Amino acid sequence: MASVIHFVEGKLRLKVNREKCAVARPWKRKFLGFSFLSNKQATIRLAPKTISRFKDKVRELTSRTRLLPMEKRINQLNRYMMEWLGYFRLAAAKSHLIQFDGWIRRRLRMCLWKQWKRVRTRIRELRALNVPEWACFVMANSRRGPWEMSRVTNTALPTSYWEAKGLKSLLSRYLELC
């Protein structure tokens, strides 16, 4: 580290920020949200902090307490996801994007379940989604929370439902860009 600082400050006449600089293996350092795998190809990956920041922002956009129509919520979510993917498309993140897509749809199902506050509304909406009559009553009268019910309503609100509502898939956009 001392020799690098001496070279940069002496020969190049640049100032070195000693708090941010370090000499380490590439896979142990993070740079602008990216990190590297410890293989010979030096595969670019997402830094762990990047993943947690993405999830925090999606949690903020899909909060149950935010009073927004679903269309506006999906538009804001699409805008954020496409900007994020445009920046991080260099990273090998296919497995992360598969998980993110499923998790985001579950968050949206949770918001939708929370919007259907009354049992009568839940029964009506589930009937409109062609859920069997007996399942409508069981699901609508359940006392489980919105997060748990978002798992149960997976068959009633599949991926095609969200695509029809305008939700974009991170994985499909990633594969288009690559």
Image: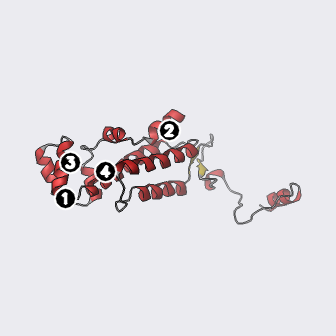
**First in sequence: mark 4 or mark 1?**
4
Which numbered disc, 2 or 4, marks the residue that appears first in the sequence? 4
Asked whether disc 4 touches disc 1, contact meaning CB atoms under 8 Å apart, the reply is no
Mark 4, Cα crowd under 10 Å, few <14 / some 14-19 / many 20+, is many
Along the polypeptide, which appears first: circle 4 or circle 3? 4
Q: Which mark is residue 26?
A: none
Residue under label 2: 174
Please identify the quarter of the rendering in which residue 147 is found: bottom left
Give the labeled residue for mark 3. Answer: 125
Instruction: Tell whether 29 sits left or right of 178.
Output: right
Residue type at mark 1?
Arg
Which of the two discs, 1 and 3, labels the residue nearer the N terminus?
Answer: 1
Assign a secondary structure to mark 2.
helix
Q: Secondary structure at mark 4?
A: helix
Indicate the amino acid at tag 2: Tyr
Q: Which of labels 2 and 3 is toward the front? A: 3
The three-letter amino acid code for the residue at tag 4 is Arg
Q: Which residue is mark 1?
A: 118
* Number of residues whose C-alpha sits closer than 10 Å to that of mark 2, classed few (under 14), some (14–19) or many (20 or more): many
Residue plotted at (27% across, 46% down) = 154
The residue mark sitting in front, 4 or 1, is 1
Q: Residues within 10 Å of mark 1 (few under 14, many from 20)?
A: few
What residue is pinned by disc 4? 109
In three-dimensional space, the C-alpha distance between marks 1 and 3, rounded to whole angstroms, equals 11 Å
- Nearer to us: label 4 or label 3: 3
Seen at 39% across and 55% down, the residue is 62
Query: Which mark is nearer the camera, 2 or 4?
Result: 4
State the residue lying farthest toward the right. 11
Q: Are dots 2 and 3 in contact, CB under 8 Å?
A: no
